[in-house]
Amino acid sequence: MSVITVREMAAADINSEWLGVPRAALMENAGAAVARAVLRGFPKARRVLIVAGTGNNGGDGLVAARHLCSIGITVRAVVLGDVREEPARANLQTLQRLRCPELRTVRDGQDLLMLQEWFLWAEVIVDAVLGTGIKGRIREPHATAIDLMNMSPAPKVSVDVPSGLDPDTGEVRDRAVKATVTVTFHKPKTGLVVPGADKYVGMLVVAPIGIPREAELYVGPGDFLFADFRRDPTSKKGDNGRVLVVGGSEQYSGAPLLTALAALRVGVDLAVIIAPYPASAAHKAYSPDIISVPLDGNALELRHVDLVAKYAERSDVTVVGPGLGTEEDTAAAVRELARRLGGRRLVVDADALKALRGGLPPRSIVTPHAGEFEFLFGVRPPGELEDRAGLVRRMAEANNTTILLKGRIDVISDGRQVKLNVTGCPGMTVGGTGDVLAGIVAAMWTKTDSPLHAAALGAFVNGVAGEEACREHGYHFTASDLLPIIPRIIRRYAGH
């Protein structure tokens, strides 16, 4: 049975709305599913009590109350506080306009004890108190509500998760409803199927509520839940991310600069470039925000590896490749550097991909386009998206790496999971957008431990930046135009 964590479910909810399926529709479907479960499981019951919290779980219960009332069931509903969030608040207001159910709001355990008779009156109790939002010890009036539900002889139908049960682990740290039936949505939460959880879960019913498959497959705003952009007020320079970019050559100075500037725009504290002297001089002249360390000579060579490795060991993520060139000594230096940094966070891009054919460093992120993918793995990505995704997953698994295959639809896989990114525009064929992508991916890897989520979020942000640049400039923008857009996207979707 396929299961889902609370964070994954929350991301799917957000992505569903981004794809055009509003949360109000999901709540309506969830509440209707609960009502059906009550009718199917207890067809002779004519008196139903809904115990609702103030969040979305409570909103699901309030929708169930409306559906049960509509077919003549006598319903009473008690709400454990003030409902402020939409769409739960809208559903409460709807019930307040109707003659059914009989509705009360309580704010503490003592007030709830005054309604103890309701719990004895009910032939079925719907537990819509906490759902997946449990954190630590149960507060009042929720604790009293759980106790009263458990004391009642009526069967209990829990909404999504029995209130008090940790939905990820199945642990009960304080108290929890002992449900007769649990109606969970979309997929079982991981804590519902662990050994021992059944004494709280009862019979498990999995109800589809209209979350599209693409809400988990496509990268969207919900995926920002897998990264942490918060900053400790006591943090110091470097605590929020250090990215090293190894790139540049006599011919190419702009590529590593775009990578480093993109990393800074995502929110790392320091972006350091190590580049041959001609490129390094250009970086210093262009931006005071970049630390650029010059290498003696016109290209990266084997003799430079000791110095580069020393800087890499002080960095959270290293990007290797932008603008390096393809000289044989440079390729040999890349291979030696990859060997020394094996196991560290390494993003391999551009010219470095050509040097590492047949020997990708483990647990790295690689960012090839279709031609580079064919060069790396000896097989050209097929045109059919499903076949392409399957091939990327197999190659990622076989090479113990995370692959971000760039294209009209980016395919990202760590060998276990596949994500697709559909953001972007045709104007992003302009040179340098791949270098910006590498910097975003590297910086994202300082905000999450998952290379899959770092690569997926990097592709999403880069694509959305391209879309916004295209709206502003048409197809007449440059890669540099993406840079000031990046912070806006992160603030919009991550709130930081």
Image (tube, rainbow, N blue to C red):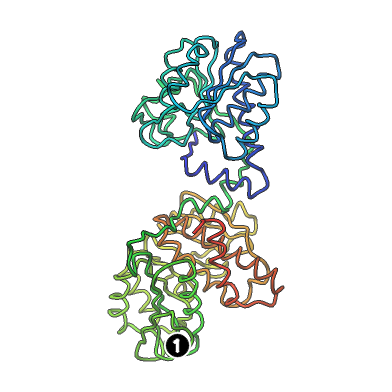
Give the labeled residue for mark 1: 279
| Residue 31, position as x, y percentages in the image | 62, 28
In depth, the one of 319 and 283 nearer the eye is 283
| Residue 293, position as x, y percentages in the image | 36, 84
Q: Is residue 243 left or right of residue 91?
A: left
In depth, the one of 313 and 283 nearer the eye is 283
Marker count (numbered): 1
Under tag 1, what secondary structure?
helix
Q: Is residue 411 left or right of residue 453?
A: right
- Identified by mark 1, the residue type is Ala
Residue at (60, 10) in percent of width and height = 45
In depth, the one of 182 and 360 nearer the eye is 182
Depicted 15 relative to depicted 208: above or below: below
Q: Residues within 10 Å of mark 1 (few under 14, many from 20)?
A: many
Depicted 181 relative to depicted 231: above or below: above
In the picture, residue 64 is in which quadrant? top right
Q: Is residue 357 left or right of residue 437?
A: left
Residue at (56, 53) in percent of width and height = 221
| Residue 386, position as x, y percentages in the image | 61, 51
| Residue 298, position as x, y percentages in the image | 41, 90
Depicted 155 relative to depicted 463: above or below: above
Residue at (49, 86) in percent of width and height = 286
In the picture, residue 362 is in which quadrant? bottom left
Residue at (55, 56) in percent of width and height = 493
